[in-house]
Amino acid sequence: YTRIVKIGPRAGDGAEMAILELVGSEFEKKVKKKKEKGKAKPKAK
């Protein structure tokens, strides 16, 4: 969807101005969790 907000005339030539916003496509980033596979490996000496 698109949101249009009129912000009034431009100072230089009086042309009407507006802000266009894309809405409705926001999504939350999925945070990947590390999977633990069994026991932790011991460090090499």
Image: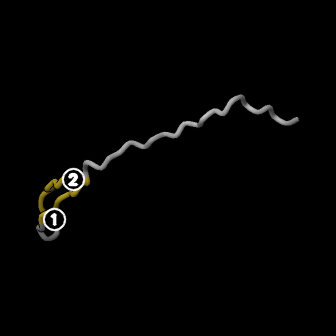
- Mark 2–mark 1 CB contact (< 8 Å): no
**Horizontal relation, residue 27 to residue 31: left or right:** left
- The residue under the point 12% across, 68% down is 15
- The residue under the point 11% across, 67% down is 14
The quarter in which the C terminus is drawn is top right
Residue 2 has which mark? none
Above or below, comparing residue 5 to residue 31 in the picture: below
Amino acid marked by disc 2: Tyr
- The residue under the point 17% across, 59% down is 18
Identify which residue, 43 or 3, lies in the foreground.
43
| Secondary structure state at the residue bearing disc 2 | loop
| Secondary structure state at the residue bearing disc 1 | loop
Residue wearing tag 1: 11
Amino acid marked by disc 1: Ala
Residue wearing tag 2: 1
CA–CA distance between discs 2 and 1?
Answer: 29 Å
Q: Locate residue 20: give its quadrant.
A: bottom left
Identify which residue, 4 or 44, lies in the foreground.
44
